[in-house]
Image: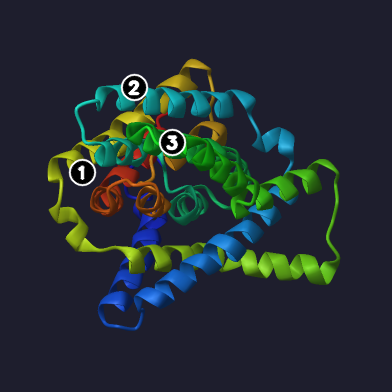
Amino acid sequence: MSSLTPIFPAVLPVFLLIGLGLLLRRVGFFTAASVEALSRLVFYVAVPCLLFDSIAKSELGQAFDSIVILSAWSLVAATAGALYLAGRSLAPELRGTFVQGVFRSNLAFVGLPLCEGAYGKEALAPAAIFLGLMVPIFNFFAVLVLLLPHHSGNSRQGLGTLGRSLALNPFIIGSGLGIVASAGQLQLPVALGTSVEWVGRIALPLALLALGGSLEFRRLQARTGLIALASALKLVLYPALFLGILVFFHRSGLLLKVPVILLATPTAVVSFITAREMKGSEDLAGGIVMATTLASAVSLPVWLWVLELF
Protein backbone atom coordinates (compact mmCIF):
# COMPACT_ATOMS: atom_id res chain seq x y z
CA MET A 1 0.00 0.00 0.00
CA SER A 2 1.91 3.03 -1.24
CA SER A 3 -0.85 5.57 -0.73
CA LEU A 4 -3.96 6.07 1.33
CA THR A 5 -6.25 4.90 -1.50
CA PRO A 6 -5.86 1.11 -0.95
CA ILE A 7 -6.01 1.55 2.84
CA PHE A 8 -9.65 2.59 3.05
CA PRO A 9 -11.00 -0.75 1.70
CA ALA A 10 -9.18 -2.43 4.60
CA VAL A 11 -10.53 -0.04 7.24
CA LEU A 12 -14.00 0.74 5.90
CA PRO A 13 -15.60 -2.69 6.57
CA VAL A 14 -14.53 -2.44 10.22
CA PHE A 15 -16.33 0.86 10.75
CA LEU A 16 -19.29 -0.07 8.56
CA LEU A 17 -20.00 -3.03 10.84
CA ILE A 18 -19.49 -0.89 13.96
CA GLY A 19 -21.93 1.61 12.45
CA LEU A 20 -24.40 -1.15 11.65
CA GLY A 21 -24.27 -2.33 15.26
CA LEU A 22 -24.89 1.23 16.45
CA LEU A 23 -27.81 1.62 14.01
CA LEU A 24 -29.39 -1.68 15.04
CA ARG A 25 -29.24 -0.56 18.67
CA ARG A 26 -30.74 2.85 17.80
CA VAL A 27 -33.72 1.39 15.91
CA GLY A 28 -34.41 -1.14 18.66
CA PHE A 29 -33.34 -4.29 16.82
CA PHE A 30 -30.62 -4.69 19.44
CA THR A 31 -31.47 -4.20 23.10
CA ALA A 32 -29.00 -3.72 25.94
CA ALA A 33 -29.58 -7.36 26.90
CA SER A 34 -29.04 -8.68 23.38
CA VAL A 35 -25.84 -6.64 22.95
CA GLU A 36 -24.56 -8.04 26.24
CA ALA A 37 -25.43 -11.58 25.14
CA LEU A 38 -23.72 -11.04 21.78
CA SER A 39 -20.63 -9.66 23.52
CA ARG A 40 -20.51 -12.70 25.80
CA LEU A 41 -20.78 -15.05 22.81
CA VAL A 42 -17.88 -13.26 21.13
CA PHE A 43 -15.78 -13.06 24.30
CA TYR A 44 -16.29 -16.56 25.67
CA VAL A 45 -16.73 -18.65 22.51
CA ALA A 46 -16.06 -17.11 19.10
CA VAL A 47 -12.79 -15.21 19.65
CA PRO A 48 -11.18 -18.04 21.69
CA CYS A 49 -11.99 -20.43 18.81
CA LEU A 50 -10.45 -17.98 16.33
CA LEU A 51 -7.33 -17.58 18.47
CA PHE A 52 -6.90 -21.32 18.86
CA ASP A 53 -7.47 -22.05 15.17
CA SER A 54 -5.14 -19.27 13.94
CA ILE A 55 -2.28 -20.15 16.29
CA ALA A 56 -2.63 -23.94 15.99
CA LYS A 57 -2.26 -23.72 12.20
CA SER A 58 0.72 -21.34 12.34
CA GLU A 59 4.49 -21.75 12.48
CA LEU A 60 5.33 -20.34 15.91
CA GLY A 61 8.86 -19.44 14.90
CA GLN A 62 7.54 -17.08 12.24
CA ALA A 63 4.66 -15.63 14.27
CA PHE A 64 6.34 -15.08 17.66
CA ASP A 65 9.05 -12.55 18.44
CA SER A 66 10.24 -12.22 22.04
CA ILE A 67 11.67 -8.74 21.45
CA VAL A 68 8.28 -7.49 20.25
CA ILE A 69 6.46 -8.97 23.24
CA LEU A 70 8.98 -7.76 25.83
CA SER A 71 8.96 -4.30 24.25
CA ALA A 72 5.17 -4.16 24.41
CA TRP A 73 5.11 -5.32 28.03
CA SER A 74 7.72 -2.72 28.96
CA LEU A 75 5.79 0.05 27.20
CA VAL A 76 2.57 -0.84 29.00
CA ALA A 77 4.35 -0.88 32.37
CA ALA A 78 6.12 2.43 31.69
CA THR A 79 2.93 4.08 30.42
CA ALA A 80 0.90 2.91 33.41
CA GLY A 81 3.57 4.03 35.87
CA ALA A 82 4.24 7.42 34.30
CA LEU A 83 0.58 8.36 33.90
CA TYR A 84 -0.29 7.12 37.39
CA LEU A 85 2.38 9.36 38.90
CA ALA A 86 1.39 12.29 36.68
CA GLY A 87 -2.25 11.93 37.74
CA ARG A 88 -1.71 12.49 41.45
CA SER A 89 -4.05 15.50 41.45
CA LEU A 90 -6.99 13.52 40.05
CA ALA A 91 -9.74 12.11 42.24
CA PRO A 92 -9.20 8.40 43.06
CA GLU A 93 -12.04 7.22 40.82
CA LEU A 94 -10.65 9.22 37.88
CA ARG A 95 -6.96 8.44 38.23
CA GLY A 96 -6.90 4.73 37.46
CA THR A 97 -9.71 5.03 34.93
CA PHE A 98 -7.75 7.59 32.92
CA VAL A 99 -4.55 5.53 33.03
CA GLN A 100 -6.10 2.27 31.84
CA GLY A 101 -7.91 4.17 29.10
CA VAL A 102 -4.57 5.07 27.54
CA PHE A 103 -2.79 1.70 27.54
CA ARG A 104 -5.62 -0.84 27.19
CA SER A 105 -6.19 -1.48 23.47
CA ASN A 106 -9.14 -3.16 21.78
CA LEU A 107 -7.08 -6.02 20.37
CA ALA A 108 -9.90 -8.50 19.73
CA PHE A 109 -12.94 -6.49 18.65
CA VAL A 110 -11.09 -4.00 16.40
CA GLY A 111 -7.49 -5.22 16.12
CA LEU A 112 -8.06 -8.69 14.70
CA PRO A 113 -10.55 -7.62 12.00
CA LEU A 114 -8.31 -4.71 11.02
CA CYS A 115 -5.19 -6.89 10.76
CA GLU A 116 -6.98 -9.41 8.56
CA GLY A 117 -8.47 -6.68 6.39
CA ALA A 118 -5.18 -4.83 5.95
CA TYR A 119 -2.66 -7.68 5.79
CA GLY A 120 -4.64 -10.83 5.02
CA LYS A 121 -5.11 -14.10 6.88
CA GLU A 122 -1.35 -14.52 7.35
CA ALA A 123 -1.53 -11.64 9.85
CA LEU A 124 -3.93 -13.50 12.13
CA ALA A 125 -1.32 -15.82 13.68
CA PRO A 126 1.08 -13.09 14.89
CA ALA A 127 -1.94 -10.99 15.90
CA ALA A 128 -3.45 -13.86 17.88
CA ILE A 129 -0.18 -14.62 19.69
CA PHE A 130 0.35 -10.94 20.48
CA LEU A 131 -3.22 -10.70 21.81
CA GLY A 132 -2.88 -13.78 23.97
CA LEU A 133 0.33 -12.51 25.56
CA MET A 134 -0.88 -8.91 26.01
CA VAL A 135 -4.19 -9.67 27.74
CA PRO A 136 -2.54 -10.68 31.06
CA ILE A 137 -0.37 -7.56 31.20
CA PHE A 138 -3.32 -5.30 30.31
CA ASN A 139 -5.47 -6.88 33.01
CA PHE A 140 -2.74 -6.80 35.65
CA PHE A 141 -1.94 -3.11 35.27
CA ALA A 142 -5.60 -2.14 34.86
CA VAL A 143 -6.47 -3.72 38.21
CA LEU A 144 -3.34 -2.25 39.80
CA VAL A 145 -3.98 1.37 38.76
CA LEU A 146 -7.65 1.09 39.76
CA LEU A 147 -6.88 -0.43 43.18
CA LEU A 148 -4.00 1.78 44.29
CA PRO A 149 -5.78 5.18 44.39
CA HIS A 150 -8.26 3.85 46.94
CA HIS A 151 -5.60 2.20 49.15
CA SER A 152 -8.19 -0.47 49.78
CA GLY A 153 -7.76 -2.91 52.61
CA ASN A 154 -9.06 -5.52 50.21
CA SER A 155 -6.07 -5.21 47.87
CA ARG A 156 -5.14 -8.84 48.40
CA GLN A 157 -8.67 -9.84 47.56
CA GLY A 158 -8.52 -7.71 44.42
CA LEU A 159 -5.24 -9.25 43.33
CA GLY A 160 -6.62 -12.71 44.09
CA THR A 161 -9.59 -11.96 41.87
CA LEU A 162 -7.14 -10.81 39.20
CA GLY A 163 -5.25 -14.11 39.41
CA ARG A 164 -8.43 -16.12 38.96
CA SER A 165 -9.62 -13.94 36.09
CA LEU A 166 -6.30 -14.36 34.30
CA ALA A 167 -6.33 -18.14 34.73
CA LEU A 168 -9.90 -18.36 33.41
CA ASN A 169 -9.65 -15.69 30.70
CA PRO A 170 -11.02 -17.20 27.45
CA PHE A 171 -8.47 -15.35 25.29
CA ILE A 172 -5.58 -16.71 27.33
CA ILE A 173 -7.04 -20.23 27.30
CA GLY A 174 -7.65 -20.15 23.54
CA SER A 175 -4.20 -18.76 22.81
CA GLY A 176 -2.49 -21.14 25.22
CA LEU A 177 -4.15 -24.21 23.75
CA GLY A 178 -3.30 -22.99 20.27
CA ILE A 179 0.37 -22.61 21.20
CA VAL A 180 0.39 -26.15 22.65
CA ALA A 181 -1.26 -27.54 19.51
CA SER A 182 1.16 -25.73 17.20
CA ALA A 183 4.27 -26.60 19.19
CA GLY A 184 3.23 -30.26 19.50
CA GLN A 185 1.92 -30.44 15.93
CA LEU A 186 -1.38 -31.69 17.32
CA GLN A 187 -4.51 -31.84 15.20
CA LEU A 188 -8.14 -31.98 16.26
CA PRO A 189 -10.43 -34.63 14.78
CA VAL A 190 -11.70 -33.37 11.42
CA ALA A 191 -15.29 -32.74 12.54
CA LEU A 192 -14.22 -30.91 15.71
CA GLY A 193 -11.52 -28.92 13.91
CA THR A 194 -13.99 -27.82 11.24
CA SER A 195 -16.51 -26.78 13.89
CA VAL A 196 -13.90 -24.70 15.73
CA GLU A 197 -12.88 -23.06 12.45
CA TRP A 198 -16.49 -22.21 11.58
CA VAL A 199 -17.15 -20.69 15.00
CA GLY A 200 -13.94 -18.69 14.70
CA ARG A 201 -15.11 -17.26 11.37
CA ILE A 202 -18.09 -15.52 13.00
CA ALA A 203 -15.92 -13.89 15.67
CA LEU A 204 -14.81 -10.78 13.80
CA PRO A 205 -18.12 -9.55 12.33
CA LEU A 206 -20.00 -10.30 15.54
CA ALA A 207 -17.34 -8.51 17.59
CA LEU A 208 -17.76 -5.35 15.51
CA LEU A 209 -21.56 -5.48 15.70
CA ALA A 210 -21.36 -5.91 19.48
CA LEU A 211 -18.94 -3.00 19.78
CA GLY A 212 -21.24 -0.74 17.76
CA GLY A 213 -24.25 -1.78 19.80
CA SER A 214 -22.47 -0.92 23.05
CA LEU A 215 -21.51 2.67 22.11
CA GLU A 216 -23.36 5.48 23.91
CA PHE A 217 -22.89 9.10 22.83
CA ARG A 218 -24.02 10.46 26.20
CA ARG A 219 -20.72 9.26 27.67
CA LEU A 220 -18.93 12.03 25.77
CA GLN A 221 -20.62 14.76 27.80
CA ALA A 222 -18.65 14.28 31.02
CA ARG A 223 -14.96 15.02 31.66
CA THR A 224 -14.34 16.19 28.11
CA GLY A 225 -10.81 17.44 28.88
CA LEU A 226 -9.65 14.10 30.29
CA ILE A 227 -11.38 12.23 27.48
CA ALA A 228 -9.64 14.35 24.83
CA LEU A 229 -6.23 13.96 26.49
CA ALA A 230 -6.61 10.20 26.90
CA SER A 231 -7.71 9.87 23.27
CA ALA A 232 -4.69 11.80 21.97
CA LEU A 233 -2.28 9.76 24.07
CA LYS A 234 -3.97 6.47 23.17
CA LEU A 235 -4.27 6.94 19.42
CA VAL A 236 -1.14 8.98 18.66
CA LEU A 237 1.66 9.01 21.25
CA TYR A 238 1.28 5.46 22.60
CA PRO A 239 1.59 3.65 19.21
CA ALA A 240 4.24 6.15 18.07
CA LEU A 241 6.45 5.19 21.02
CA PHE A 242 5.96 1.51 20.24
CA LEU A 243 6.82 2.06 16.58
CA GLY A 244 10.00 3.86 17.60
CA ILE A 245 11.01 0.98 19.88
CA LEU A 246 10.46 -1.69 17.21
CA VAL A 247 12.31 0.34 14.57
CA PHE A 248 15.20 0.68 17.04
CA PHE A 249 15.27 -3.14 17.28
CA HIS A 250 15.19 -3.42 13.46
CA ARG A 251 11.81 -5.17 13.26
CA SER A 252 10.03 -5.12 9.90
CA GLY A 253 7.20 -6.71 7.94
CA LEU A 254 4.25 -8.16 9.82
CA LEU A 255 6.29 -8.39 13.04
CA LEU A 256 6.41 -4.59 12.97
CA LYS A 257 3.07 -3.67 11.41
CA VAL A 258 0.73 -6.04 13.25
CA PRO A 259 1.83 -5.20 16.84
CA VAL A 260 1.86 -1.45 16.20
CA ILE A 261 -1.58 -1.39 14.58
CA LEU A 262 -2.93 -3.53 17.44
CA LEU A 263 -1.73 -1.05 20.05
CA ALA A 264 -3.06 1.82 17.91
CA THR A 265 -6.64 0.52 18.22
CA PRO A 266 -9.16 2.36 20.42
CA THR A 267 -9.57 1.68 24.12
CA ALA A 268 -11.01 -1.74 24.96
CA VAL A 269 -14.71 -1.88 25.86
CA VAL A 270 -13.87 -4.11 28.82
CA SER A 271 -12.14 -1.13 30.48
CA PHE A 272 -15.61 0.28 31.18
CA ILE A 273 -16.63 -2.92 32.97
CA THR A 274 -13.38 -3.02 34.95
CA ALA A 275 -13.81 0.61 36.04
CA ARG A 276 -17.38 -0.05 37.16
CA GLU A 277 -16.40 -3.11 39.20
CA MET A 278 -13.34 -1.52 40.84
CA LYS A 279 -14.62 1.89 41.98
CA GLY A 280 -13.48 3.77 38.91
CA SER A 281 -15.46 6.33 36.93
CA GLU A 282 -17.99 4.70 34.59
CA ASP A 283 -18.62 7.97 32.75
CA LEU A 284 -14.93 8.65 32.11
CA ALA A 285 -14.26 5.05 31.03
CA GLY A 286 -17.27 5.01 28.71
CA GLY A 287 -16.34 8.41 27.30
CA ILE A 288 -12.80 7.30 26.49
CA VAL A 289 -14.07 4.14 24.76
CA MET A 290 -16.56 6.14 22.72
CA ALA A 291 -14.15 8.96 21.79
CA THR A 292 -11.24 6.71 20.84
CA THR A 293 -13.50 4.45 18.77
CA LEU A 294 -14.88 7.41 16.81
CA ALA A 295 -11.49 9.11 16.40
CA SER A 296 -9.82 5.87 15.31
CA ALA A 297 -11.82 6.06 12.08
CA VAL A 298 -9.29 8.76 11.16
CA SER A 299 -6.20 7.66 13.09
CA LEU A 300 -6.12 4.01 12.00
CA PRO A 301 -5.98 4.71 8.24
CA VAL A 302 -3.16 7.16 8.94
CA TRP A 303 -1.28 4.55 10.97
CA LEU A 304 -1.71 1.95 8.21
CA TRP A 305 -0.22 4.45 5.77
CA VAL A 306 2.67 5.34 8.11
CA LEU A 307 3.51 1.66 8.62
CA GLU A 308 3.88 1.18 4.87
CA LEU A 309 6.88 3.53 5.04
CA PHE A 310 8.84 0.99 7.10
Q: Residue 94's x, y, as percent?
A: 25, 40
Of the numbered discs in the image, which one, if any, rests on residue 227?
1
Screen quadrant of the C terminus: top left
For image coordinates 57% across by 29% down, the residue present is: 69
Q: Are marks 2 and 3 in contact (CB under 8 Å)?
A: no
Of the numbered discs in the image, which one, if any, rests on residue 157?
none
Packing grade of label 3 (10 A; few <14, some 14-19, many >=20) is few
Residue 177 appears in the figure? yes
Residue 258 appears in the figure? no
SS class, disc 1:
helix
Q: How is the image coloured?
A: rainbow
Q: From the viewer's perspective, is residue 143 above or below residue 34? A: above
- The residue wearing badge 3 is 153
Q: How many marks?
A: 3
Q: Out of 39 and 72, give the one closest to the viewer.
A: 39
Q: Out of 129 and 159, give the one closest to the viewer.
A: 159
Three-letter amino acid code at disc 3?
Answer: Gly
Three-letter amino acid code at disc 1?
Answer: Ile
SS class, disc 2:
helix
Screen quadrant of the N terminus: top left
Residue 239, picture quadrant: top left
Q: From the viewer's perspective, is residue 309 above or below residue 4? A: above
Q: Are marks 2 and 1 in contact (CB under 8 Å)?
A: no
Q: From the viewer's perspective, is residue 140 above or below residue 296? A: above
Q: Residue 291's x, y, as percent?
A: 24, 50
Give the residue at the far front of this rendering.
Answer: 153
Three-letter amino acid code at disc 2?
Answer: Ala
**187 displayed left or right of 71:** right
- The residue wearing badge 2 is 82
